[in-house]
Amino acid sequence: MGRVIALDLSRRTEVLVADKDPESLSGLKAVKTFSGNFREIPDLEKAEVIVTALPSEVARDVVEFLLKQGKNVVDISFTDYDPFELDKLAKANGCLYLPHAGFAPGLSNILAGKLYYGHGSRNIEILVAGLQDKPMPPMGYIPTFNASSVIDEYTRPARYMENGSLKEADPLDSVETMELEGVGAVESFYSDGLSTILQTFKEGSIIEKTLRYKGHMEKMRFLNDMGYFSSEKIGNSSAREISDELFRRTVRDVPDMSILKVIPKDRRGPEYSIIDHYDRKNGISSMGRMTGFSAAAMTMAVIKSKIHATGTFPAEWIGKDDTAFSFIMEYLKEHSIDIRLINH
């Protein structure tokens, strides 16, 4: 994801890419690079915006360090801490923190924010998926992002809002089958991807559901029931640690697609619908496109002062501002990301 973001932004502004692993920087000939500790990044004071694309377990330390330096931060990590915990720190240092700025959460929040703030919708359903073009063995699915985070989708309670009240659902107990145009039979389940919306939307009902090919969730329920997702230590490791590694080993580069539907169930506003596919010409996965270009769009919106604020600024607030919203929609359109408006 970081590679996609860096190369895209380099076409519009000067970019420095930093990573502790030199191998991760290989092939980035269009940009300046630095391999080493993030606290030693050269010329950090010159940066207008820092984009962080890091594993969730290390993201907070890096973000806090950057905010203390007064740097605007756009972060695509889906972390388990409350981003508003860093609001005072960002404001004290006169900078902006835009968390969870990827595909979902991220673009999904922007579109939900447009429905909520711009159209007055109070009953919103988000459907999201990153799938291969066809089911792949042995699970009927290959992780399209961090494999451990994929397992989290099945084990972490899914938070949602119902009539203004916070609720939770067990993802593996919420599986339903539905027909998706252009895809066929899929399974949907409650997922915990609403992020800051759970705090910023003060009323109404909003849920997020993730989609998988039919049959996949039965396999995940079996693995969970057998204890393969348990963090309990058995000897020197846990079943969860082994499962994380085995899931990672299934990853391979095959054509994928990303699906996003943000639906006003009360029909206040349009349904936003995206079905995006693997970029064969440039060798970029659809998930890379949707996450990377969404993050790049938000970053350029900050650089171009379409978003100007201090403190924690969640993606859904972009939906309040026609200028910022239009800028990001146009940016994605330029990257051939087709956001269809249905019933509008």
Image (cartoon, helix red, strand yellow):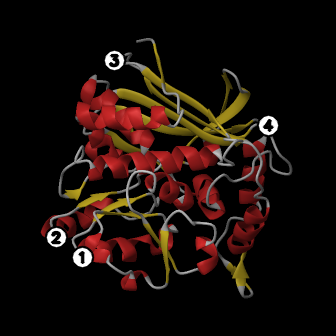
Query: For the residue marked with disc 2, what is the amino acid?
Result: Asn
Q: Position of residue 175 (x, y in %)?
A: 65, 38
Residue tagged 3: 268
Q: Nearer the viewer, mark 3 or mark 1?
A: 1
Residue 335 vs 246, above or below: the answer is above
Residue tagged 1: 69
Q: Which residue sits at x=69%, y=48%?
A: 283
Q: Earlier in the sequence, mark 1 or mark 2?
A: 1
Q: Position of residue 22 (x, y in %)?
A: 60, 80
Query: For the residue marked with disc 1, what is the amino acid?
Result: Gln
**Distance between mark 3 and mark 1 Cα atoms:** 42 Å
**Distance between mark 1 and mark 2 Cα atoms:** 7 Å
**Distance between mark 1 and mark 4 Cα atoms:** 46 Å
- The reply to whether the C-beta atoms of the residues labelled 1 and 2 are less than 8 Å apart is yes
Q: Which mark is residue 134?
A: 4
Residue 152 vs 18, above or below: the answer is above
Say which of 227 and 200 sits in front: 200
